Amino acid sequence: MDPQLVVIGGGPAGSTVAAHVSGLDTVMVEEHAAVGSPVQCTGLVHPRVVSLASASETVLNTITGFKLFFPGGRMLDVGSDEPKALVIDRRRFDELLSERAVEHGAKLLTGHRFQGFERTPDGLRVRLDGPDGPRYLGTPLLVGADGYKSGVGRGAGLGPCREMVRGIQAELDVRLEDQEKVEVHIGSNVAPGFFAWVLPCGERTRVGLGVSSGHGAPSQYLSALLKRRGLDGARRIALNAGAIPIGPPKRTVADNIILVGDAAAHVKPLSGGGLLLGMRSARDAAQTAMDAVANGDLSERFLSSYEDAWRADVGKEIERGMLIRKVFVGMTDKKLDEAGRMLDRDDVREILATGDIDYPSKLAAPLLRKVPSLIKFSPTVIGQLLRR
Ligand SMILES: Cc1cc2nc3c(=O)[nH]c(=O)nc-3n(C[C@H](O)[C@H](O)[C@H](O)COP(=O)(O)OP(=O)(O)OC[C@H]3O[C@@H](n4cnc5c(N)ncnc54)[C@H](O)[C@@H]3O)c2cc1C
């Protein structure tokens, strides 16, 4: 029998949709032989993500602060007594979520790649390529949770996202002395248009960065960072590359189709974190999927309730993040160093220590009250940010 829902992608967004559509006959399709690999993630999340996913068993380390390195060498050391973020085993995290989806009744089809769909009088005919050749599934509703390259989004004419940042990360067989703080490095020679990180993770260390387009290969920046950080001699356990979609497309639904997670650029524009936003939007997608099938209405108009729901939930923080990113990418190294000088004060560090990695925009108003001259870096955009 044809399923009532086909979800493409066995990542956190796809598994969350599949686990929350009670009563719908659901097939979740994953192109790899197993869910969770290859890993394309640092696994740094706020503790609320681990709670949301009930995934405490995947936690590897607790982070209480950060060290921010400016291009000219200044370092801002910000600590707190509370856990600010957790480092997770991303492979195990994905496995756990997909196991939950299966426990809730979804059928998981691994080793099958979505190739496209055609419209039929009853909905869609979805083509998958598997080990035994092409296979077709008829369904009224298709969820594209197929990541930043989203073939579902392309096929439906949705997208693209506004910008794609290329990311790379090496996992090293080395233990850092400071296990509580993540290093963040900024500057045009380190990670143009984004940032680099050095994340302690017990006996291992994750070193990675993002680069916005037009700045050359991320691997060359990674080699330089490893060298500068004295980590180029450490044994590499893994090297992963991926991309971070920034800025959701105008529409994330079409007739019979919903996009969620990275496929819809449900990602924090400043940090590139997508787990929280993807999983929260996936719950909205599941609710709309159930309502749409129950009502027999799979039109774009009906499915728009999903789009309204995710924009009301996470859309505002994404838009604020886009504005902060605009200010950040507009700053030269010289301006970044100047901002570093202005922020290097105990009272400012105290404000930074209250920050929440999921809501960076909440720091804007208190920081500007303490250091009003920060506004000079982009009066118009910072003004827009404060009005939102
Ligand atoms: C270098 C890097 C570091 C990151 N670090 C963090 C971090 O620390 N914290 C954080 O919150 N986020 C981080 N992210 C972002 C995070 O990894 C993503 O936002 C998250 O994985 C999105 O989940 P998803 O389920 O939407 O997509 P994905 O996790 O990408 O899952 C999509 C799934 O769809 C499958 N698929 C794709 N195409 C097809 C097809 N045609 N047929 C069948 N299956 C298909 C893929 O194999 C994959 O399993 C990072 C990203 C990168 C690149």
Image (cartoon, helix red, strand yellow):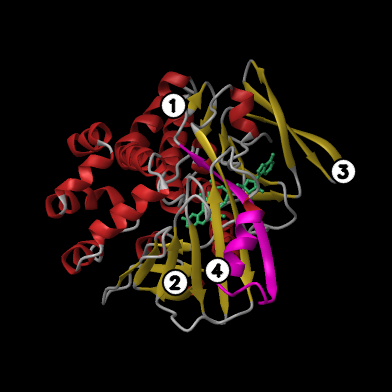
The residue carrying mark 4 is 89
Mark 1 or 2: the one toward you: 2
Q: Nearer the viewer, residue 201 or 132?
A: 201
**Quadrant of the rendered structure where residue 158 is?**
top right
Q: Earlier in the sequence, mark 2 or mark 4?
A: 2
The residue carrying mark 1 is 303
Task: Specify whether residue 232 is painted magenta.
Answer: yes
Residue type marked 2: Ser
- Give the extent of the magenta segment: 220-246
In the image: residue 382, left or right of residue 287: left
Tell me the tag on residue 56: 2
Q: Earlier in the sequence, mark 3 or mark 4?
A: 4
Mark 3 or 4: the one toward you: 4
Q: Is residue 92 visible?
A: no
Residue type marked 1: Leu
The quadrant of the picture occupied by the C terminus is top left
**Quadrant of the rendered structure where residue 63 is?**
bottom left
Q: CA distance from mark 3 to mark 4?
A: 32 Å
The residue carrying mark 3 is 132
Q: Is residue 136 visible?
A: yes
